[in-house]
Amino acid sequence: MKSVVIHAEGKVHVEERPIPQLKTDDDVLVKVVSAGLCGSDIPRIFSHGAHYYPITLGHEFSGYVESYGNEVTDLQPGDAVACVPLLPCFSCPQCKRGFFSLCKSYQFVGSRSEGGNAEYVVVKRANLFRLPSTMPIEDGAFIEPITVGLHAFNLAQGCKDKNVIIVGAGTIGLLAMQCARELGAISVTAVDINPEKLALARTLGATHALNSREMSAAEIQSALAERQFDQLILETAGAPQTVALAIEIAGPRAQLALVGTLHQDLTLNANVFGQILRKELTLLGSWMNYSSPWPGTEWETAARLLTENRLQLEPLIAHRGDMQSFATAVEALNGAPMQGKILLSLP
């Protein structure tokens, strides 16, 4: 089979690899149809961030069940599935309470084991979410990134009847924004420095779109004055300045969910830190996208929204292609952030 293989020096090659074999009774062989590059894959490719090399990445993928071990009794060949990349231990104190995202003895598809940027991949049964028969299988590659925002909403006890503010209009932010709109938010505001992303946010249903390069934090807060209460802010950009901005623009007793992963140290001056206290903000750390019962309501909600055609995915895709074009598009990033989802599409 063909596989997109990452080497330690940041080289991306399409290589012939043996089709993986079932090794345990709970293994499932999946024929991959669609796979997406995640922002977290970029340091694995270009900054020696993978657990080993060479490696086939890919934890955002969908495909069809080919075969499975003797313990798998609830799947059939040809079933459409999406990857649930985390494999928690299910036995630690965190797992026993349903806090699967907090398991410290986990495995992860496409990071600690071979992933779905290949024609075939073997994963555990627990790593698969069965897709509704009425949902396009290609959409299944988006379920995992959709659930990232939904997990933050779950931690905040939902987004219904709240003024949702998304700081960072990348793929995760724009998916979360659409979900908030469909799940009953009063308003949805996108904040970013990129006018093209803000224009796309408006197209995708943002109530308001504010440019934080052109507006100060005080000006943004003033623009939000009519929506200053019942705020739920998602910081999805993962930059020190956007975390500080989210705190500064927050209204009284706002909830602030920190979703983006920082790759630089965060330093808050006394004034910004004081706003957490003076505005009585609730800070929520949101890590991954799982809850109980496994893999969580996030996954059911994502599948439902996609099945009901309530989310627009096509405008979020920057590139879709076969193995070689996917590898070329990935290598061309040279460590820079994606400006839209890069998808591998297989027949």
Image: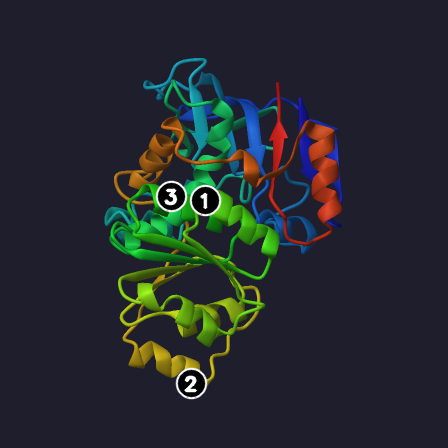
Asked whether the residues under the numbered discs 3 and 1 touch, taking CB atoms below 8 Å apart as contact, a structural biologist would say yes
Callout 3 amino acid: Cys
- Residue extending furthest toward the top: 77
Q: Residues within 10 Å of mark 1 (few under 14, many from 20)?
A: many
Quick one: quadrant of the N terminus?
A: top right
Asked whether the residues under the numbered discs 3 and 2 touch, taking CB atoms below 8 Å apart as contact, a structural biologist would say no
Q: Percent from the top left, x then y, of residue 126?
A: 38, 32
Q: Quadrant of residue 127?
A: top left
Position above or below: 198 against 108: below
Q: Can residue 147 be seen from the camera position used here?
A: yes
Horizontal side of 228 relative to 84 (left or right) equals left
Q: Identify the residue position indicated by label 3 in the image.
A: 179
Position above or below: 221 against 301: below
Q: Identify the residue position indicated by label 1 in the image.
A: 175
Element carrying mark 1: helix
Q: Which residue is drawn at 30% across and 67% down?
A: 254
Q: How crowded is mark 3: few (under 14 residues within 10 Å), some or many (20 or more)?
A: many
How far is mark 1 from mark 2, CA to CA?
Answer: 32 Å
Element carrying mark 3: helix
Position above or below: 287 against 24: below
Callout 2 amino acid: Asn
Q: Which of marks 1 and 2 is nearer the N terminus?
A: 1
Horizontal side of 337 relative to 310 (left or right) equals right
Q: How crowded is mark 2: few (under 14 residues within 10 Å), some or many (20 or more)?
A: few
Q: Residue at x 26, y 39 (%)?
A: 293
Q: Identify the residue position indicated by label 2 in the image.
A: 271
Horizontal side of 301 relative to 173 (left or right) equals left
Q: Percent from the top left, x then y, of residue 268?
A: 47, 79
Quick one: quadrant of the C terminus?
A: top right
Element carrying mark 2: helix
